[in-house]
Amino acid sequence: MLMAHPTVLSNLVEQYEALRLLHAGSGSTEARQRMDDVSYTLCVSTGTGDVDSALVAARHRLPGARPEDDSVLPA
């Protein structure tokens, strides 16, 4: 499987988080489409099937991540 460059993953995670904070999922058609596009790209880039798994996988591939670090998982 091809692996996305950490810079690309970091950018995607940042975009997703910004869109989520702006509630893009319930916003305009363009905002929802952008959220869908970023979510899809995260999934493809990490080889996962849902955005939550993609975020965990992306964060674990970023510099400084520890394999045992589960701080990105919801409580």
Image (cartoon, rainbow, N blue to C red):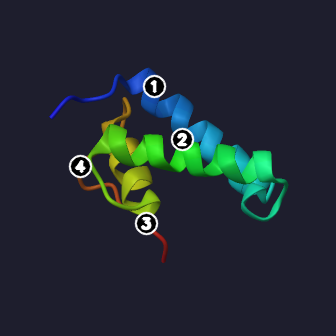
Circle 2: element type? helix
Marks 3 and 2, Cα distance to the nearest angstrom?
14 Å
- Is residue 5 left or right of 34 when viewed as pictured? left
Q: In what quadrant of the picture does the N terminus appear?
A: top left
Amino acid identity at mark 3: Leu
Residue 75 in the image: state x and y as whole percent: 48, 77
Amino acid identity at mark 1: Val
Residue 34 in the image: state x and y as whole percent: 67, 43
User: Measured along the vertical axis of the image, is residue 38 above or below residue 25?
Assistant: above
Rendered image: mark on residue 13? 2
- Say which quarter of the image contains residue 9: top left
Report the residue marked by disc 1.
8
- Say which quarter of the image contains residue 13: top right
| Pointer 2 with pointer 1, Cβ within 8 A | no
Q: Earlier in the sequence, mark 2 or mark 1?
A: 1
Report the residue marked by disc 4.
67
Circle 3: element type? loop
Circle 1: element type? helix
Amino acid identity at mark 4: Pro
Report the residue marked by disc 3.
73
Name the residue rendered at 45%, 40% in the picture: 41
Amino acid identity at mark 2: Val
Name the residue rendered at 39%, 52% in the picture: 54
